Amino acid sequence: MLQGVVLGQGADLSQTPALQKPLSLRFIMRPLREVIEQVASQTGATLGVAKAIEQYKVTLIVRDQPAWQTLHMLTRVYPVEWRGEENERYYLTEIAEARSQRLRQQQAQRQALQRALDAQLQHLQQATQTDFLTLRQQLTSIDAEIDRLAEQQPPDWAEQTERLAQQRARIGRAGESLLCYILGVLAQAWTPEQRLRLWNGQVLLASTKPLAGAQPMTENALQWIRAWSPAFEEQPPESAQMLIRLEPDSKQLILALVTRTGGSTVSFIERLPLGGSDSGSTPTPATLPEAVGRISLRRTAEQSLPTPPYWGNQFTLAEILAWLADHTDLNIVADAFRVPMPLAAERAWTATTVADWLQDVLQTNAVLFESPANSWLIARHREQVELIPSEIDELTLERFEKRASSGLSLDDYAEFAALLTPAQQRRLETPTGYALRFDTAPLQNSIPALRFWASLTPTQRQTANERLPLAYPQLTTTQQRLFWDAIEYALLNPTIPSGDLLQRLEQLYDPQTHSELAFFTEQWKNTNFVTRSDAVTLTFEDVESYEQTLRELKEQGLSISPEQFSNTQRSLYFGYGASSAVVYIIDLRAPKP
């Protein structure tokens, strides 16, 4: 974790004449490259920054401090150091040991996940040496005996209960979940190629009926399904398919069991946690240096709190520290990430010291503080090592945030989604993962579909916008892969509509029917009218009610801000038709001029 971060030493900048110049700088959530270029411009020194770290973000606010000292403080918030070349040329680079340490940590995390996956599969495989129905009977007997012991409480009931609990644990999820049991059965026959496909995030398919590319599933599965699910008491299942995918970032296996009987389909989806990389240790509580915490804030009656700059009225550490710098004599240097950080208005209004102001931040235990010299405060995120690979560079974010002032289109969101790495996607799909200046709702559970849209040519997009289908065989190889990514992501996500596509799963995976697959879109538009006052926000969908309310509010002398928004709902279909396709529903909103 970051508590063990490697701090820089490197070249001694304090002896360079040009860097003796005192500087006053103000950078809030800016790339290192921008900061270094500004210092070089103001001092005339020759400074550079390695490309690998030039997009690392910092908050740096200093007043009349020697340039060399300010540059040195940057090495305390990231594992970087200054290197000197001839003729007093200096460049900032990542410490070699820190880079090696990060690579070792990433390798250790992958190995831990691999061990956890192997251990889980081995446990399930061992359990499947006993028939599923027998395991179910054993669990029922164990639970009944535990209940009896709890009710009668014989002299050794605690010891007996413990032994029964251990027996139950040995059976585990294989006896509780049919999906896990079938996973154990299938895993016994996996080839190295199948295991590699699973590890790389590809979906594995198994079926009781012959399907191209599908692993055969034992016919006994139909008997197990009937005994396991009340849905098949009257009519037994005729066939079953199972989809399996590994999510390395969330450390989970996603399992989907699709069963068919007559004209109906029943599906079950389960997430199997793997764990494997958590140390389990409790992090050291974050604290402020005592002397810094006692510093009083400069406040006047006219001064207000900072305005939340991000969608959903969110702050990051950068804005909180910037306000603090404006109300104290502290020089502040911090790493910067688009991570939401709390700032309770009630507490902030009454804060009188630095400790008061930072209390919400400290309670998250997410930020580490130090004061290496008088009037200096250094801050860095505890999870810096994990945040760096999932942080989107500031120039990219600002490009889309600038467009957002007039509303982001489907093309904009698709372009953004296509830029995301898996780590960035996972963090973006986390409710508190990012603080952005635009609505991220269109990205939630829609990134695979948006990536497909981004791959389309202008001509293909025009065809789709005219509500004409794009036939699967006419797509490029890359587009076909993205098409399947969108389908399989949706099939394993119960919140995404899929019509009766699950009922046609056998057909879906039959290459002979792929000529019938297509992508197509639909869209609906309407306008919302919004009036805002200090006390209330009202939204209308019809212009008559909006105009009447507007007149009434004006007659009451209320200060109001009327706005109009254009709402567009885009539905992206992947499948055979509107009723046999996965559907990604994306709501877009833009202000009307």
Image: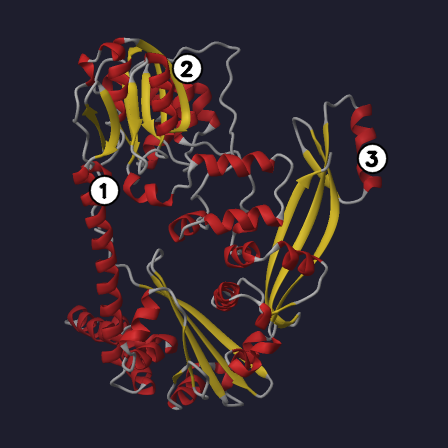
- Separation of residues labelled 3 and 1 (CA atoms): 57 Å
Q: Amino acid at mark 2?
A: Asp
Instruction: Report if the CB atoms under discs 1 and 2 are less than 8 Å apart.
Output: no
Spot occupied by residue 546 in the image (x, y as percentages of width and height): 79, 37
| Helix, strand or loop for disc 2 | helix
Q: Residue at the spot x=34%, y=23% of the render?
A: 36
Mark closest to the chain's N terminus, 3 or 1: 1
* Dot label at residue 329: none
Image vertical order of residue 386 relative to residue 577, above or below: above
Figure quadrant of the C terminus: top right
Mark closest to the chain's N terminus, 1 or 2: 1
Residue placed under numbered mark 2 in the picture: 326
Instruction: Residue 293: tell me if it is visible.
Output: no
Image vertical order of residue 499 relative to residue 556, above or below: below
Mark closest to the chain's N terminus, 2 or 3: 2
Q: Amino acid at mark 3?
A: Glu
Q: Nearer the viewer, residue 116 or 70?
A: 70
- Separation of residues labelled 2 and 3 (CA atoms): 43 Å
Q: Residue at the spot x=66%, y=28% of the render?
A: 535
| Helix, strand or loop for disc 3 | helix
Assess disc 3: are there few (<14), some (14-19) or many (≥20) residues with their C-alpha within 10 Å of its C-alpha. some
Q: Nearer the viewer, residue 77 or 514?
A: 514
* Dot label at residue 1: 1
Q: Amino acid at mark 1?
A: Met
Image vertical order of residue 80 relative to residue 583, above or below: above
Q: Quadrant of residue 376?
A: top left
| Residue at the front extreme of this rendering | 87
Mark in front: 2 vs 3: 2
Left or right of 47 on screen, residue 410 = right
Q: Which of the colour schemes (rainbow, by chain, secondary structure, one colour) is used?
A: secondary structure
Residue placed under numbered mark 3 in the picture: 547
